[in-house]
Image (cartoon, grey):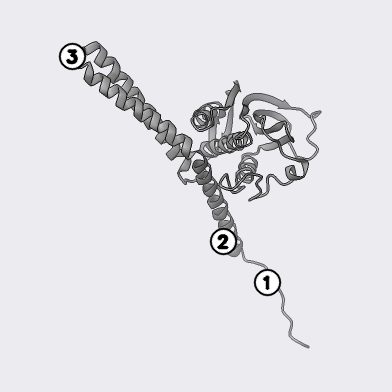
Amino acid sequence: MGAFCMSQKPTYEELEQKIKKLQQADSQLIQAQKMEALGTLAGGIAHDFNNILTGIFGYAQLAEIHINQPEKAKRYIALLVKSGKTAAALVRQILAFSRQSEVKPHPLSVYSILKETLKLIMSSIPSNIKIKEDISSKAMIMADPTQVHQVIMNLCTNAYHAMDDTGGLLTVRLHDTVISRQQSFPDLNILTGHYIKLEVIDTGHGIDQKNMETIFDPYFTTKGPGKGTGLGLAVVDGIVKKQNGFIKSYSKVGHGSKFQIFWPILK
């Protein structure tokens, strides 16, 4: 009888090794996309930081001019200290976002992270784009704060890129919602219950139906050169799914796009 080969099943150790490699690759992808997001905002961040420094120098000079008028000098020194604290907070926010650290989900408020992220976004968007906030939910979810920050930043960055040339309105909403048995998401396997719904809406150029089918694929992008690699939405989709949430997207060419993130509320 001729010799024959039987394919061996991978051992537990081999499977464990493969899983570790996949987890490392996933972590590296998320970190690379963080750096891309920060690079996109770098110009606005630098401008914002420069404005803070201008204020610090200005208040220092005014305090020196009024050195013989203690009350005035004291007021300018207080403003100088306040500007310094604003600069320090901006640096802390950037470092916290860019740091590669172990993902540690814990109960958190999306409300506070959203408010912080929007401050950073506001310093980076062109003056012809306005932001409208409708933020009410203070419910808690189980998630990693840096990853929630990344989801918000990616969606808002995509939204304002869609309005770069023409300007427009960026609307950000955060509300509690209930998904009942009657509510239909036929394309998704959704558990009923209480959710936080984050909506990011732009009035940009919109995305056609063909491209809408592939927007969550890695490296897919409709942006021009230098405006992203196409990792953003793929990373958002991956993060939200790991947090037991889901994402819905809507768009119409010439009218804009809407992205909705649903996170299950902690009870």
Q: Position of residue 166 (x, y in %)?
A: 63, 31
For this orientation, the residue located farthest to the bottom is: 1
Which one is in front, 73 or 249? 73
Q: Position of residue 157 (x, y in %)?
A: 58, 36
The three-letter code of the residue at mark 3 reads: Asn
Badge 3 is on which residue?
A: 68
The three-letter code of the residue at mark 2 reads: Gln
The three-letter code of the residue at mark 1 reads: Gln
On screen, residue 183 versus residue 219, left or right, reads right
Which one is in front, 193 or 251? 251
Residue 124 vertical placement versus 212 (above, below): above
Badge 2 is on which residue?
A: 17
On screen, residue 253 versus residue 109, left or right, reads right
The label on residue 8 is 1
Q: Position of residue 218 (x, y in %)?
A: 64, 50
Residue 150 vertical placement versus 137 (above, below): below
* Quarter occupied by the C terminus: top right
Q: Position of residue 38 (x, y in %)?
A: 49, 41
Which callout, 1 or 3, points at the residue further toward the start of the chain? 1
Which one is in front, 31 or 242? 31
